Image (cartoon, grey):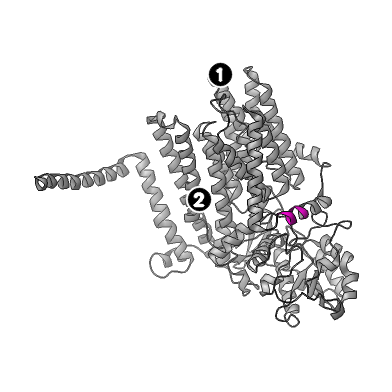
Amino acid sequence: MSEGVAGPVATGGRQGWVSQILGGLRFLATDRYGLLLLAWGLVAFALRPALLSAHAGAAGWPYAEIRNALDPVALAHAASVIQWVAFTGLVALAVIAHTRYAAVNPAAFASDASRFRIAAAYALLLMTGYLLFLWSPVSVFTIITNDSLIFFDSTYRISNGLVPSNDFPTALGAAQLYLPAWAAWLIGGYGGSVELASVWVALGLGLVCAVVGAPRMPVAVTALLLGVVFLVTVPAAMLDRWGGESITLVNDDTELLADNLTWAMFYNRWGWAALIPLCMVLIPRRDRAAGPALGEIAVLAALLTFLFWLKASYFAAGLGMAAIYAFLNPAPWRTLGLGAGATAAGIVCVGLMTGNLLSYLNDILLVGKVSGARADSMLGLIRRNMMEMLFALAPLGVLAAIKRFHWRDGLVAGSILAMSMFVINQNGQFENMSTLIVLAAYGAVRVMGEADAQRVARIAAAGAFGMLAASQTFDRGLVLIDQAYAILREKAREPAEWAGVAALRGVYVPERESMFDRALTLSDLDETRIRNVWLSGQFGRRQELRQGEYMQTLLAGMEDLKPVVKRGETVNTLDMTNPFPFLMNLRAPRGGWLTLHMNRTISEEVHPAPETMFADSDHVMIARISLMQPTADLMKELYGPWLDANYAARVDTLHWTRWSHRKPSLRPRDSGDP
């Protein structure tokens, strides 16, 4: 009997599979969503691989034909656009599917659990799409190259067993140092390491947004805020416009570098993104009588722990938001106590793992004596960001117009505005306060939550929020094209002078041209030559030096060091960063600061004693031509006389002043190899 039953079941199963396949093909051929899905599949998995393979030099059809039709730069641009379309198409298809499903099954989004799952799915989708279609183990710097190399230096020091703040002073937290170091270890190089670490951070912050948004707002609003978090965290461009445009030569044609690509100060982007969910918790829950869930408090404590180990100013802002969150909820003292205890426990746990909690706090206090509070530019910042602030406040204006504005709304608005101004001012930024979008979301959710609000009021509030969100989404989203294009453009160029340095595998600096040679011909005196550098050409520069000129100084420094550095010896550079150990695979020095910046980490009044700074330095380099010339000049003023007295040799070259070999009577006994 069992055999007689099995036969029809198996046949029905086969017929079921056949009918499902035919139904799927019919859907792709007739339904508009199916046609979009088919078109996206062709772009993502046929056209994109073809263009990338043609760009990489693959032989045969159709790759040769593509290269014949497009020059290398045009091919790079076309391929980057298709990469971006593959990524954004995946997200757009998910949004359409979400919208259609919600229209048919609105009850499916009625519970907090379902709203969390949908928002979390968006976070996973953004990460997967970026890694699948856009990311590669390559980094491109068009501005602030010197600052970006700080994190290659920190990765090298950590990989050599040094512990931040214990073995080298820095007020930069472990989160921004260890995550890129882990990524570099995973992929086997510096190129693409910070980008990969940023994707992990974006995923984690996106999941926090999903947790916070589920009990408070429609899933569409949560997903949009989550997308802003991703686009603040991941693209390589700075949040504000910086440095202008520049010109370089690609295949003997001038190329305008409109892309402001850098990983300098990426921790500021991480910090702004982390503050978005901390502002989201100020939006009232649907069930206002219910106290915060323990899980939510634990997630927020983890977020504050991350900010503590990222940068002190963002942690201070996050603490303010967390305190207001506690007192706007039932049982405020219980919420505050649980949150403070969980945050402290998280901070201590990370401190136990890294072993540098006390030394990190000491470095923060030391740097605080240098940078301190900054209030002189507040009025200018308000004027510069007035339009964005008014858009953020517009939904609350609608709430006031329908006479539903409450004192709590004013407290939340004032808190977010004050926190945003504090962060942007304290970190020397000018615009793009990403947290303002949450203020707009707060007002929109409040208006939509009023049952008697008229349709026009709902549209006005949602429209103001949508316009502010769209401006950030499109602006940051289009940077992904610049990032993909820069990678392909640089791969198509002839190798740069520094391409043979093993540590710079997968690292590109597009702005290659140098005016140094021209300046050299104008004088026979070094001091006059240096002055001529600042007067020469300006060739569309973004900074005092072109990035290629900075790289040229590093190559010159390496050539100067090679004959004198012995095995096991260290080099300490008194500039924005110390690039020579990782560039030359030297022993990383103990005691040398990770980053030096005049009036930000060091000043004429507050600076380490030379006996501490150079305790493990066999060679000391100070740039004579620097991207941070005031810092280099201050270093020479502070430490030059001591170095002259305590080192056996001083050598001045065009680009560097080098002191070599501590005098035997002054050398520490334990300065040998670790």
Horizontally, residue 256 falls left or right of residue 9, namely: right
| Residue type marked 2 | Met
- The answer to whether residue 37 is above or below residue 442 is below
Residue range in magenta is 357-362
Occupied quadrant, residue 550: bottom right
Residue 290 appears at what percent x and percent y? 55, 26
| Residue type marked 1 | Ala
Q: Looking at the image, is mark 2 or mark 1 earlier in the sequence?
A: 2
Residue at label 2? 127
Q: Residue furthest bottom?
A: 563
Horizontally, residue 117 falls left or right of residue 339, namely: left
Residue at label 1? 453
Residue 134 appears at what percent x and percent y? 51, 55
Q: Secondary structure at mark 1?
A: loop
Occupied quadrant, residue 47: bottom left
Residue 63 appears at what percent x and percent y? 42, 65
Q: Is residue 360 magenta?
A: yes
Location of the N terminus (image quadrant): top left
